[in-house]
Amino acid sequence: MTTTSPGDLPAPEFRAAFHRVADLVADYLEHVGEYPVLPKVRPGDVRALLAPVPPKDPEPLDRVLDDYRRIVEPNVTHWNHPGFMAYFGITGSGPGILGEALAAGLNVNAMLWRTSPAATELEETVTDWLRQMLALPAVFRGHINDTASVSTFLALAVARDRAPGLEIRERGMAGRADVPALVVYASDQAHSSVDKAVIALGLGLANLRKVPVDDQFRMDAVALEAMIAEDRIHGRLPIAVVATAGTTSTTSVDPLQAVAAVCRREAVWLHVDAAYGGAAATCPEFRPLFDGMEQADSIVVNPHKWLFTPVDCSVLLVREAAALRAAFSLVPDYLRTDEEGVTNLMDYGIQLGRRFRALKLWMVIRAFGVTGIRERLRHHCALAQELAGWVRAEPGFELAAPVPFSVVCFRVTRGATGEEQDKLNERVINRVNAAGSVFLAPTRLRGRVVIRVAIGNLRTGREHVAEAWRLIREAAAGV
Amino acid sequence: MTTTSPGDLPAPEFRAAFHRVADLVADYLEHVGEYPVLPKVRPGDVRALLAPVPPKDPEPLDRVLDDYRRIVEPNVTHWNHPGFMAYFGITGSGPGILGEALAAGLNVNAMLWRTSPAATELEETVTDWLRQMLALPAVFRGHINDTASVSTFLALAVARDRAPGLEIRERGMAGRADVPALVVYASDQAHSSVDKAVIALGLGLANLRKVPVDDQFRMDAVALEAMIAEDRIHGRLPIAVVATAGTTSTTSVDPLQAVAAVCRREAVWLHVDAAYGGAAATCPEFRPLFDGMEQADSIVVNPHKWLFTPVDCSVLLVREAAALRAAFSLVPDYLRTDEEGVTNLMDYGIQLGRRFRALKLWMVIRAFGVTGIRERLRHHCALAQELAGWVRAEPGFELAAPVPFSVVCFRVTRGATGEEQDKLNERVINRVNAAGSVFLAPTRLRGRVVIRVAIGNLRTGREHVAEAWRLIREAAAGV
């Protein structure tokens, strides 16, 4: 047998390569603004640069890093670019990147307390920091998932499985006459992750009610209550309402007090999707918009969206952690341990493997401080207000939605018909994106295409928003 | 308004801190063997060292890194320790750690091709490399999830939703007389992630059949067929079989040819859980054990288990990618793009957010080469065989299962009753773990406690296995 371990890379080679990586990342972030936000590649271009078969023999690390620099770095979409204003602008900040690098070195799996006490207790501590920053009562308990899609999925799974007398965890929903259709409610502005959760949970998209919104894209709580009543008349069982605090298209905030009151009266689970908006709730001046959130059964906030933490990091705060454990805890023989009264994070969801995500969030909050985080969020919101002011003042443009946080939706109003106007706005976006210094993604509001500028990157300054506005006006004049 | 962006950390500060992190990680990996594998902490000890409230003001990065070094590093369980032989021994190798650090710097979300062409095409390429390494036909298409729990969950979701005529995606399973109970089959040695998937999908644990195993812990394909027939007689609909190629307790491999034949005859989805074992399938001498895998509908292999890739990285290979898209694709307005014929990875599961996990796997395969990977796997398997030989030769010990790969299960045979023997074996494990140089987790086979030594860390050499064996014998003599 081989008695000498072939082992990892030789230690000095690894150390040297890591220092090169430190410079590669630091250089990238210093110069990211010089790239076009969207790389100039067509589908298949990158694949053509990659070997179609895996290498038989080891390759020197420097060659691999050269290829990273040549093939990978220039051909990603630059989410760190100050002109990235599509989707939600996000930043994996410096402290967060360092946290990821350290976590990769430790490579722990905190499925059990025993398999990493520090990762488990840091996760409990830092999610409690976030709870405090959100001014939520101490009853909420947090844990970290990869994405809001999973956080929302888990919340709705608990809402489903706690339906009294149905024993869905044990007996399932199929082949039973005693399980009524189970209904979930969300506004027609809610994120597609709600739809996906409803599919995955076996509830059926037909049992997801899209509640209409008011003129500011906020859920109509009266309509919600009527829809619940209608479902009850037809023998269906309402199980959960997903209220959104910061919708994806316009960042509108559902009326949480009113929605919570309906949920309490109807005894349905209230899940608040604050994946993006939750960040703003850490600022006292924005917190009133979120009043009612404290009555939720579960809340998701994604630090990887607007809290400067690298993907992935989604915090799910739950009022009754025991309900989450009741839905998912399941301890096989090979995972039994003796410790009593400890948190075993594997009990809080379907994923047994868990990265040490708390580390990066801990480093971000410490390096920026609550004050520093608020200052950055306010800066983004102020830029958005300034842009909204420019739009309001510009003939031929109109704001398409209120601007509560850092996303501005507007449209060019020229065009005889709605369809013509849509095409015009799409052409404006495509022209702006072709220029390279800014990347915008469109959305639709009430069926009409709108231009959407999402500010959220740490590198975005007034000059970048001004450049976006200049390009948009120029494009609008030319199309 | 603030016109100057508060921004990220100053660039020179970030660069300097990153170099410090490079040394922190390199130092850690050079000296990890000097720590006790399990940190000497009690529940709450780490929490007591952390601030209970979030810091108001920014803290210097060096202080945060000092605290990392003081509070976090010593108090994790050291998965990188050469004496880590619990669960599955895993290693986030040097090239993989560098890949994670680079990915954190880019911080892309490859939900759409457009949101990162390089991340999308690298993921397609590197999962195809893995397919080739597994000697699987080109029809299989791979994508990367966080964990095998999610990969298996997705596979079973497709199996559920393609049930003809039921339209479960649209109509769900509840409140319907026309949906029979849907049944999933796995051996009684299958991983708990199958149970969790069945819970989450709303199928009900009662509809998960635990198929008995033979004397080598492999699924009994005859019993499987009989159970399927029995379910059909009772009007239930068999939808999927999960065969395991490398079970968690003993790494046994279900008879894939025989199971695949049953699945074909019965037209049920065959999912192969090769999360751990799949690594070994990259070696020609182990590949025959996996014959039949090419008939599967889906296969999960976790590079973060035994392919030296940091957590998380789970590859799901699917025969009909279109079935996966049919189950999960859902494109909201804000995610529509013009590119045609491209892969949008968000269509392959429930998670919209996706880290750039392909990068680390690409770097690991290139840095080690297929030859280097095989060499390392063979080394682990040879160590396991040598340990098995020592156990066989030792009076008072017996092997509890065959040793196909790198995990050895055995027990001390003293003790008048089974319960006495169990207690004795537990005491042996606890004594070994208390010594600090080795960490073992027990499992149970046929209800009896066994000692389980899992070899899989790149730093584990013959001397560490010999030390584990010395401690086990010493403990057995003393208890």
Image (cartoon, coloured by chain):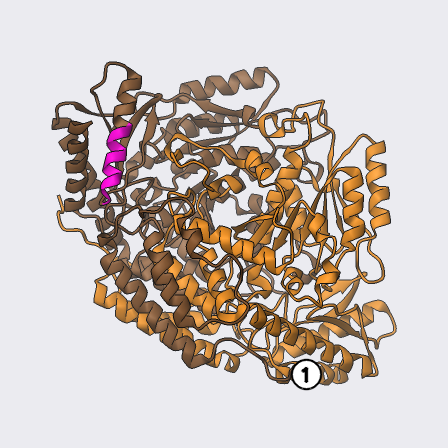
Chain colours: A orange, B brown
Image side of residue A68 versus residue B478, left or right: right
Residues drawn in magenta: B426-436
Give the camera-side residue of B46 and A414: B46
In the depicted structure, whether residue B3 falls above or below residue A98 = below
Q: Number of callouts in the render?
A: 1
The image position of residue B212, as x and y in percent, is 40, 21
Residue drawn at (31%, 25%) of the image: B449
The image position of residue A276, as x and y in percent, is 64, 61
Quarter holding the N terminus of chain B is: bottom right
Image side of residue B313 versus residue B82, left or right: right
User: Crowdedness of circle 1 by 10 Å Cα count: few (<14), some, many (20+)?
Assistant: many
Q: Main secondary structure of the magenta part?
A: helix
The image position of residue B191, as x and y in percent, is 42, 34
Residue B112 seen in the current view: no
Residue drawn at (48%, 70%) of the image: A367
Instruction: Let me know if residue A148 is in the magenta part.
Output: no
Instruction: Let me know if residue B430 is in the magenta part.
Output: yes
Write down the residue under mark 1.
A471
The image position of residue B386, as x and y in percent, is 15, 37
In the depicted structure, whether residue A55 falls above or below residue A328 = below
Give the camera-side residue of B66 and A332: B66
Image side of residue A47 versus residue A150, left or right: left
Residue A370 seen in the current view: yes
Give the camera-side residue of A397 and A339: A339
Quarter holding the C terminus of chain B is: top left
Q: Secondary structure at mark 1?
A: helix
Give the camera-side residue of B226 and A361: A361
Mark 1 chain: A
Query: What's the residue type where badge 1 is placed?
Result: Leu
